[in-house]
Image: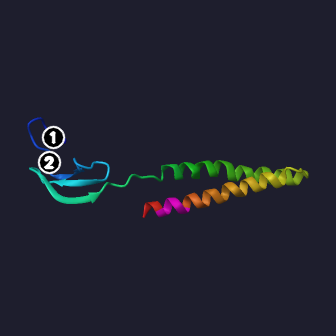
Amino acid sequence: MGGQPGQPAPPGWYPDPDQPDIHQRYWDGAEWTDQLAPLAREDTSAWIIGIGYLGSLVVIPGMMVAAYLNAKGSVHTRWVFILSLFFLALWIVAAIVGAANDT
């Protein structure tokens, strides 16, 4: 545990020395107590944020290209539009999952 050499660590929650990957245990400044708590949850929404940014870079230009291709009568309009909708749906799902993870 932290603290100055020869001095105990200050009171607080620390990884349980017996099961550090499972939970944390309260150190009262002198000894471990019987109080246990789940490990602090890591913020797993970073990848969700990345998908959100990627989606905004893909969806909006994709829709613009689909509109341009449609105006030119291109046979590729449908696939560009479908892929843009796919990424839009992925973006929405990522936002919902990210909001659920933040609660």
Which residue in the protein does label 2 denote? Answer: 10
Horizontal side of 41 relative to 44 (left or right) equals: left
Where does residue 71 sit, x and y in percent of width and height?
Answer: 88, 54
Q: Secondary structure at mark 1?
A: loop
> Residue 98, percent across and down?
50, 59
Magenta stretch secondary structure, dominant:
helix
Can you tell which mark lies on residue 3?
1
Q: Amino acid at mark 1?
A: Gly
Q: Name the residue: 48% across, 53% down.
A: 45
Quadrant of the rendering where the C terminus is positioned: bottom left
Amino acid at the residue labelled 2: Pro
| Quadrant housing the N terminus | top left
Q: Nearer the viewer, residue 25 or 7?
A: 25
Residue contact between numbered discs 2 and 1, judged by CB atoms under 8 Å: yes
**For this view, does 44 lie left or right of residue 36?**
right
Q: Where's residue 57, x and y in %?
A: 65, 48
Residue drawn at x 46%, y 60% is 101
Residue at 26% in and 50% down: 19
Toward the viewer: 83 or 72?
83
The residues colored magenta run 96-100
The answer to whether 53 appears left or right of 38 in the picture is: right
C-alpha gap between disc 2 and disc 1? 7 Å
Magenta stretch: includes residue 93 = no
Label 2: element kind: loop
